[in-house]
Image (cartoon, rainbow, N blue to C red):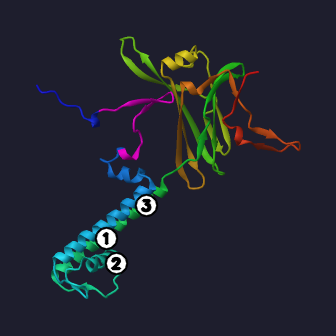
């Protein structure tokens, strides 16, 4: 029996980058060639606009060639002249209708009918795609570059910070934190196991400024008894997902972040970003959002 050859489409590569185990090409626009809708939603704006312009010019050029092939079918246009046929095609597809040039044969009328339909569908699709790209929810949320493990209320606790970069509210904000690490089952099989990490507070009714997430490391925690070395050996990753409702646009938004084992600092504490003024007023200094300091 002939062995089936494996192609690149059947192989998914894992790449270790900056201590993180990543799926190569995950979420990149160039992976969607077999899914045109997702491709047009994820391709950079410059590429999207270029595709629209190239498609528009190409469609008009093809219809212009068809008009030229039909001979003298356009009134006031030079027979066989590609430029006249091209600009007549542009006027037809855009429904401009100056009146200087118009079809005068049945062949040209049929082409105009077909091009009108193509132009209608093209404008509809381009408008829909443009709206879909603008309407995609985009959360302006940042996460601390590191997570720390330090005592909180006498219990070792995993902590990290997140902040809303927009000056609005994220209503009913919710944090979900998971831990993924390599394990060997009792049967000797390798698996990538995921555990949920319980937070002291996973809900925030109105997330506007900053939020410190706290996971106590007690005997029920998957992090109980681990060491910095074991975290690295098990390729441990902390997965964070934040969801909520943007009050400005009324849409659900989400943000995600990962902490690799090298991003988890032991016996460190975040620098306080809440500053008190002499008159009793308070403000938040985001310039120290990612800063940490050793335990006293």
Q: Secondary structure at mark 1?
A: helix
**Could you tell me which residue is drawn at 57 percent across and 19 percent down?**
221
Q: Mark 3 and mark 2: span between their CA atoms?
A: 20 Å
Q: Is residue 101 magenta?
A: no
The residue that mark 1 highlights is: 119
Q: Is residue 134 visible?
A: yes
Mark 3 and mark 1 in contact (Cβ < 8 Å)?
Answer: no
Find residue 130 and name its label: 3
Mark 1 and mark 2 in contact (Cβ < 8 Å)?
Answer: yes
Q: Which callout, 3 or 2, points at the residue further toward the start of the chain?
A: 2
Q: Mark 1 and mark 3: span between their CA atoms?
A: 16 Å
Q: Is residue 208 above or below residue 217?
A: below
- State the count of labels: 3
Q: Residues within 10 Å of mark 3 (few under 14, many from 20)?
A: some
The residue that mark 2 highlights is: 95
Asked if residue 89 lies left or right of residue 135, the reply is left
Q: Which residues are magenta?
A: 11-30
Q: Secondary structure at mark 2?
A: loop
Which residue of the protein is positioned furthest toward the left in this rendering? Answer: 1
Q: Is residue 255 above or below residue 268?
A: below
Q: Which callout, 2 or 1, points at the residue further toward the start of the chain?
A: 2
**Could you tell me which residue is drawn at 32 percent across and 68 percent down?**
57
Q: Quadrant of residue 15?
A: top left
Q: Quadrant of the C terminus?
A: top right
């Amino acid at each position: 029996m002939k062995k089936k050859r494996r192609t690149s489409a059947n192989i998914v590569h894992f790449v270790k980058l900056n201590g993180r185990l990543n799926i190569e090409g995950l979420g990149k626009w160039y992976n969607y060639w077999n899914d045109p809708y997702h491709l047009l939603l994820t391709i950079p704006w410059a590429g999207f606009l270029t595709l629209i312009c190239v498609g528009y010019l190409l469609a008009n050029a093809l219809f212009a060639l068809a008009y030229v092939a039909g001979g003298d079918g356009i009134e006031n246009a030079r027979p066989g002249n590609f430029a006249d046929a091209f600009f007549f095609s542009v006027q037809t597809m855009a429904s401009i209708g100056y009146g200087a040039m118009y079809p005068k044969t049945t062949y040209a009328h049929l082409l105009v009918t077909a091009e009108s339909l193509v132009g209608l569908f093209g404008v509809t699709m381009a408008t829909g795609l443009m709206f879909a790209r603008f309407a995609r929810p985009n959360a302006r949320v940042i996460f601390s570059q590191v997570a720390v493990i330090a005592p909180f209320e006498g219990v070792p606790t995993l902590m990290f910070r997140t902040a809303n970069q927009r000056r609005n509210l994220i209503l009913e904000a919710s944090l979900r934190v998971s831990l993924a690490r390599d394990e060997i089952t009792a049967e000797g099989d390798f698996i990538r196991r995921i555990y949920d990490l319980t937070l002291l507070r996973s809900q925030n009714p109105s997330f506007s400024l900053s939020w410190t997430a706290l996971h106590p490391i007690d005997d029920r925690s998957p992090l109980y008894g681990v060491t910095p070395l074991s975290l690295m050996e098990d390729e441990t990753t902390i997965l964070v997902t934040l969801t909520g409702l943007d009050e400005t646009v009324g849409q659900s938004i989400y943000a995600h972040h990962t902490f690799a084992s090298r991003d988890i600092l032991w016996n460190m504490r975040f620098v306080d970003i809440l500053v008190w003024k002499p008159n009793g007023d308070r403000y938040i200094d985001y310039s120290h959002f990612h800063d940490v300091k050793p335990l006293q």
